[in-house]
Image (tube, rainbow, N blue to C red):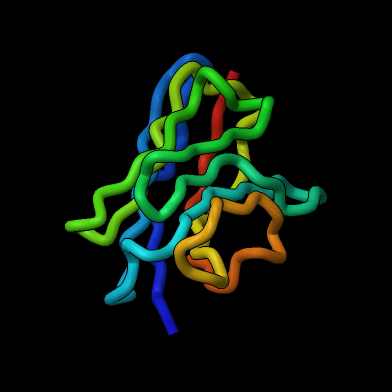
Amino acid sequence: QVQLRESGGGLVLAGDSLRLSCAASARMFSMYAMGWFRQAPGKEREFVAVISWTGGNTAYADSVKGRFTISRDNAKNTVYLQMNSLKPEDTAVYYCAQDRYTLRMPPSNVADFGSWGQGTQVTVSS
């Protein structure tokens, strides 16, 4: 069972930036698409961004497109989420997740991801 550990969350002001990191223990990390999701209080977990196993394909939720960038370093078994121009509505617990299957086009549904980190809190104050 892969272990995923997020870091980099915190309290920032609107307009600031944060970079989240997610370190994975899986030996086959480079064969899986990786995603970022978030969950605000009282809301369902929602898709934020995903990156393919090669890193060559990415997709974003419309709400973060142009502000967030997902990337990965397969040599370090780590996936990142660079978040710029943060808004109060970005406040949530952010989770990284690993695709259930290897070597496929990156999915974006919660159910397509089989392993999850514990989450890191991002709070954006106005």
Q: Is residue 102 left or right of residue 19?
A: right
* 123 and 2: which is toward the camera: 2
Q: Quadrant of residue 16?
A: top left
Q: Quadrant of the N terminus?
A: bottom left
Q: Is residue 68 left or right of residue 42?
A: left
Residue 62, compared with residue 15, is above or below; it is below
Residue 122, compared with residue 101, is above or below; it is above
Percent from the top left, x then y, of residue 69? 43, 30
Residue at the extreme left of the image, as rendered: 75
Q: What is the tally of numbered marks visible in this picture?
A: 0
Q: Is residue 119 visible?
A: no
Q: Is residue 80 left or right of residue 66?
A: left
Q: Quadrant of the C terminus?
A: top right
Which residue lies at the image location 34% right of the left edge and 67% below the top edge?
A: 29
Which residue lies at the image location 59% right of the left edge and 34% below the top edge?
A: 60
Residue 61, compared with residue 116, is above or below; it is above
Q: Quadrant of residue 55?
A: top left
Which residue lies at the image location 43% right of the left edge and 63% below the top edge?
A: 32
